């Protein structure tokens, strides 16, 4: 039943106090290695591409293009914190952006009502996924792959392989195109969602319970945590964020077609998995996920400006994921080496006389 394990490997304050300066650096490099690598990439590309990379235009392009992936990655990390995986974050966006456009162009609903309907549909999908995983006891990978495939089939059936085109109101398209202070508004969406999720995951019982379930569901249950309720809630939250991403994709593209959307699945999952290898390696976390998406965005943008071929993006995604997993493995090895040997118990230190 556990598709993903959640066990934090970041060094503790007590652990760092017992280390020398060199040992601390060696211990912390894997923890913040991905963040350091991202900064290095920014510096390198800024030096090599001074006229195109370190510009406001490129910054707006990166923020606008990768905001949807960032939201999907944050959506994916919520079930991952509880030891589950949700593939519908990639499949669902296909149907949600089609539904958002169709309800406005074919049905004639006002866009605020459409936003509410799509968000509720995303929550219902999350509830369905949670019930399949926790009530029907289907592995989360299989369950969400099945529901995601059904969503994709519905999108194909409705569109019949054609585009859905129509005039969308400026209020709806402004959900994506508005640029307050010259920054795409979607970047502010990501910031607000990240802050809320960070507070919930790190400083509230909800987050601590999700991490406890992900690390050891049996122990969490024995400690009185209602595993089923939290896991279903995690899928509902993921469905809500996935539906939001679908709305933003509709506002960005202004057309609906079933062939658009699946390309977001791999980057979203890669971003979430990369997030589990930095800041708090060994478990998914909000700022690690943002760093994971950032390194993909920066690396791909810089390589494309050098004239990289069309296959560079998936290649970079895969290579970066392998590097990050290597860093996480190194961090885990270092933690194991750093643990002091257990002191012998009094009963073992002095064998009983006459034994």
Image: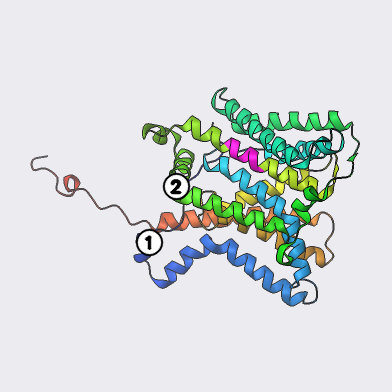
Position above or below: 305 against 219: below
Of 227 and 106, nearer the camera is 106
Residue that label 2 marks:
204
Tag in front: 1 or 2 = 2
Rendered-image quadrant of the N terminus: top right
Q: Is residue 101 left or right of residue 19?
A: right
Q: CA distance from mark 1 to mark 2?
A: 21 Å
Rendered-image quadrant of the C terminus: top left
Which of marks 2 and 1 precedes in the sequence?
Answer: 1
The residue lying at 78 percent from left, 33 percent from top is: 152
Secondary structure beneath label 2: loop
Write the start and end of the magenta stretch as one range.
235-241
Given the current orientation, which residue lies at the most extreme top position? 136
Q: Are marks 1 and 2 in contact (CB under 8 Å)?
A: no
Position above or below: 56 against 223: below
In the image, residue 249 lies in the stretch drawn in magenta: no
């Amino acid at each position: 039943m556990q598709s993903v394990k959640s066990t934090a490997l970041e060094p503790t304050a007590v652990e760092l106090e017992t280390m020398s300066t060199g040992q601390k650096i060696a211990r912390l490099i894997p923890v913040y290695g991905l963040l350091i690598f991202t900064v290095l990439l920014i510096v390198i590309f800024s030096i090599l591409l001074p006229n195109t990379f370190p510009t406001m235009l490129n910054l707006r392009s990166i923020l606008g293009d990768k905001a949807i992936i960032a939201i999907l990655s944050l959506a994916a990390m919520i079930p991952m914190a509880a030891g589950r995986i949700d593939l519908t974050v990639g499949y669902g966006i296909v149907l949600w952006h089609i539904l958002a456009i169709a309800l406005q162009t074919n049905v004639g609903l006002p866009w605020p009502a459409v936003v509410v309907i799509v968000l509720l549909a995303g929550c219902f999908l999350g509830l369905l996924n949670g019930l399949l995983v926790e009530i029907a006891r289907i592995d989360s990978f299989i369950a969400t792959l099945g529901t995601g495939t059904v969503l994709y089939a519905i999108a194909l059936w409705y569109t019949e392989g054609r585009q859905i085109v129509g005039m969308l109101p400026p209020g709806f398209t402004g959900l994506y195109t508005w640029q307050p202070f010259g920054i795409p508004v979607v970047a502010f969406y990501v910031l607000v969602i990240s802050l809320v999720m960070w507070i919930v995951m790190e400083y509230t019982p909800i987050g601590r319970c999700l991490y406890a379930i992900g690390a050891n569901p049996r122990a969490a249950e024995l400690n009185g945590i209602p595993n089923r309720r939290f896991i279903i809630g995690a899928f509902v939250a993921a469905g809500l964020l996935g539906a939001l991403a679908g709305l933003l994709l509709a506002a960005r593209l202004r057309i609906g077609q079933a062939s658009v959307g699946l390309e977001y699945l791999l980057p979203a999952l890669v971003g979430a998995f990369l997030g589990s290898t930095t800041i708090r390696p060994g478990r998914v976390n909000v700022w690690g996920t943002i760093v994971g998406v950032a390194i993909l965005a920066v690396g791909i943008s810089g390589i494309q400006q050098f004239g990289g071929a069309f296959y560079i993006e998936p290649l970079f995604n895969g290579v970066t994921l392998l590097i990050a997993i290597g860093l996480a493995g190194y961090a885990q090895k270092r933690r194991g080496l750093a643990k002091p040997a257990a002191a012998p118990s009094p009963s073992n230190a002095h064998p009983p006389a006459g034994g």
